[in-house]
Image: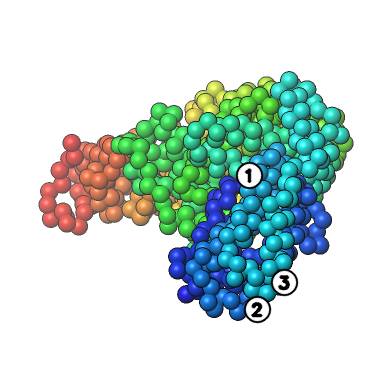
Amino acid sequence: MPPPTPPTGEPKRRRLLALPAVCPCEGIAPAPLLASLLSLAADLASRGAGDAGAFPVLRRGVRQAVRIAGLLLAFLEEVQDATVALALPAPAVLGLTELHVAMQKLRFLLTDCARRGARLWVLVNAGLAASELRAVLGSVAASLDALPKGVVDASVEAGELARLVSEQAWRVPVRPDAGDERAARTVRSILEQFKSGVSPDAEDARRVLKHIGVRTWSECSEEIAFLEDELRTRMDGAGDDSCSDAVLINSLIAFLVYCRVVLFDQIDVNPKADAAARPARCPDWIRPDALQCPITLDLMTDPVTVSTGQTYDRASITRWIKSGCRTCPVTGERLHNADVVPNAALRGIIERMLLSNGVSLPDASSSGHRHGALGNTPAPFGPAAAGAARLAVTYIVAQLSTGSTEERRKATSEARKLCKHSVFYRACLVEANAVPWLLCLLSSTDASVQENAVASLLNLSKHPGGRTALFEAGGVGLVVDVINVGARAEARQNAAAVLFYLSSGPEQAEEIGRIPESIPTLVQLIRDGAHRGRKNAMVSLYGLLQCASNHGKAVAAGAGAALAAVLAVDRDDLAGDAVALLARLAEHPVGAQAVLARPGLVARVVEALATSASRSGKDHCVALLVSLCRHGGEKVVALLGRMPGLMASLYTLVADGSPQTCKRARALLNMIHRHYEMGDAAAPAAPASEASERVIRVL
């Protein structure tokens, strides 16, 4: 029988300081059991070798545990050398099995104490960690004491080592070091100050970070990332303990965010974190937008499919349904139920893509709940977290307003991270009057400052107060300027997305349209931009066309020609957006005439209607054709009637389309039939199966 293979890494989603040891299988042979014990003991005895800072918390207790592991390794080697393993009695195997379980727990515990990113959490739980270490060492001693005398006295050295290990394991004093207790008290004191809205002494916070070995901005970010992950795990739990843990963890996250903002002047480059932050490249055969949630345009981490067949990120569609919306965001169809089905195939593609770039994906079982809990709560858990967030934001705004070039560069980067972090941070930044200062930095000659400022404004524009502040500060023109002459493509793309959020209503769309360069700039981005920039420009222009007066401006700027070019050469995703925008443009006569003026455009729309796999795409095609008939008159109706593929597509939509699409298809069919009933022209081209039958009107 093969030896029990000890875990090669932490079990997935294992909570810190949880010690889920696995008992070796019943009936295991002594030889493989001893071999596995030797491997465990060797691993434990090597912990911390050559790295004095590997265990910043419980240093003394960990050193004792490592020393005991070394003695245990020597004992096991003596037992193995004495070849007693060939004939060990059953009580000896039982004792070694218990020793194996205890050593697994010890390895988990030492791994947690040395884990990068978890140092602050271990510090505030130093008492629990010490208690667990004391219990594990007691289990080691008890398992040795339970071994038969024949095994312990396999050799003189074995007997002496066994007694020494047992004696030390029972008597070793395991408790938090004095420095650990001081640092933990300082953390609790700082959290109390945060509750009162008082800025703590920077030196106190710096001493805490020094004690746990956090010396750089990136190491502080590591701690934050770990605690956020731990918070997600706790939010999946139930009961008062999980809620209490969530409050503490969120307070510690806010403490670290405050430290990262206030204490570190430089954003150092961590190669591992930098690689994780870079956008993951997508295989050539996958459309990158197919991996984005249609609601948020963010990469889906837990894709689920609703009853209409569309796929969304679980967190986004759950919020959509809970807000009272009962229609599919993409197709507009009614959702008959709120059930969602995990899209395992798409998740597998996303996970493989991210893992190839060194990024892990959270568990699917709860990622939606976790993401929502972290990113979309209107306020953090507990007054300490709220106070720390406000103080950090106040410091950032001060740096934006009066800081040096380097300070502003860091402040814009921090603002970008925080307003992406949660709704509460966005609200704090708006309340602290960050928007006007970020607008001032849009004209910065530093490309990174401009890019971070635009990205911050993009997230703040999702907040109602942020949109109001942008308008009141006269920032729309500055955003348009970035779309036009931004230093980097990402800045131009994000600026276009800002206009989408600003055009949330007809009044706002009209105000944006009054800026002479707003619509021509978006049209230019549609014409010449990269994929994401063109998509953002189209959705922004779609929002601006809520206002009737903007239709003529869009036509004058060449929107018809730009969209026709997109429809002619681009992929299905952009082509679908182009048809939707053309349909809205054609709602008014000036837009309809612009569409009809493009040679071959109507034929391409009819072709898109026949070939599109998207139900919403088909609906936009039919809506566009109906508008063209209404504003273009009988000439357009006759043109459509002569297109052989159209009638078959319309009959199919009448039978199988959504209620809205069916209604529009029926209206278009009736227009065509009415035209031919009233005139002497040839009958419209019917589906091949009905070519020999009389065409009747669809009622």
Of 84 and 644, nearer the camera is 84
Give the quadrant of residue 75.
bottom right
Q: Sequence-wise, which precedes: disc 1 or disc 2?
A: 2
Q: CA distance from mark 1 to mark 2?
A: 69 Å
Label 1's element?
A: helix
Q: Mark 3 packing: few (<14 Cα in 10 Å), some, or many (20+)?
A: some
Quarter of the image with the C terminus is: top left
Of 335 and 390, nearer the camera is 390
Q: Is residue 390 visible?
A: no
In the displayed structure, would residue 109 be above or below residue 406?
below
Q: Residue at horizontal 55%, vertical 33%?
A: 241
- Which mark is drawn over residue 81? 2
Label 2's element?
A: helix
Q: Is residue 245 visible?
A: yes
- Which mark is drawn over residue 656? none
Q: Which residue is mark 1?
A: 493
Q: Position of residue 409 (x, y in %)?
A: 80, 41
Q: Which one is in front in this view, the residue at disc 1 or the one at disc 2?
A: 2
Residue that lies at the very extreme toward the left in this rendered image? 693
152 sits to left or right of 612: right
Q: Position of residue 689 (x, y in %)?
A: 17, 57
Of 150 and 117, nearer the camera is 150
Give, as a three-letter code, the residue at label 3.
Glu
Q: Which residue is mark 3?
A: 157
334 sits to left or right of 445: left
